[in-house]
Image (cartoon, helix red, strand yellow):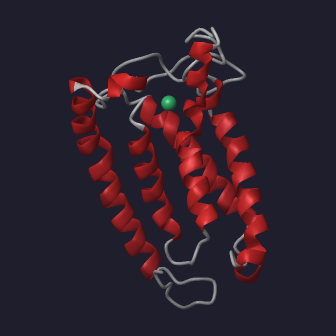
Amino acid sequence: MPTVFSHVVAATALGQCYANRRLPAKFWLWTAVCAVLPDVDVIGFSLGIRYDDMLGHRGLTHSIPFAAVVGFVGARSCAKSDTLGFGIRDSGFGIWPLWAYFAAITASHGLLDALTNGGRGIAFLAPFSNHRFFFPWRPIQVSPIGVGFFSARGLAVLQSELGWILLPSAIIGLLARRWVRLKPDATGTAGTVV
Ligand SMILES: [Zn+2]
């Protein structure tokens, strides 16, 4: 996997698509949770679950169906924040774009993992299939799990992620912010970055 840090950075870059509206902390909290939640499956190692099992690492929690479910829960949770100023009903900003957003953030985790040069492939279709997928091109150095991160290899991983995740994320985030600034909002006026 890329490091947890890089998953959150990539997700925050995608979140800049909503930078033309004031969003509650809950939105950004869910953004971070969706980005890292798939790796909750590493506890399976201590429970005796094998890497290749459906519930093993890079299994069910890294799948597209799992991302769809988590995305819906995140969207529902943020929609309930409407009374706290989220403004979904007032602006016509429905729950479905939010669902698509949180699902995409969760799915981005597995997609980034599939670009790494180590570990097993990703079970994108679980629970319907446990087939593990990798992209044919895998430039990202796989991150060691646990304390191995604080090592020379960990440093090499950070260097790899700097070039393949962090810099592209910064560019995507800046472009997204610029795009939403130019895009008219629901009232027909240009959005305002907050
Ligand atoms: Zn992962």
In this view, the residue in front, 153 or 2, is 153
As drawn, 6 above or below 30? above
As drawn, 52 above or below 177? above
Q: As drawn, is 183 to the left or to the right of 84?
A: left
**x and y percentages locating residue 91 in the rendered image:** 70, 81
As drawn, 130 above or below 100? above
Is residue 137 visible in the rendered structure shown here? Answer: no
Q: As drawn, is 194 to the left or to the right of 126?
A: left
Task: Give the residue displayed 73% in from the left and 42% down from the top.
Answer: 69
**x and y percentages locating residue 136 in the rendered image:** 37, 24
Task: Give the residue displayed 53% in from the left and 69% down from the top.
Answer: 18
**x and y percentages locating residue 27 in the rendered image:** 61, 62
Task: Give the residue displayed 50% in from the left and 61% down from the top.
Answer: 15
**x and y percentages locating residue 61 in the rendered image:** 63, 30
Which quarter of the rendering shows the N terminus? top left
Give the quarter of the image for residue 117: top left
Q: Please tell me how many numbered marks the rendered image carries.
A: 0
In this view, the residue in front, 8 or 71, is 8
Is residue 52 visible in the rendered structure shown here? Answer: yes
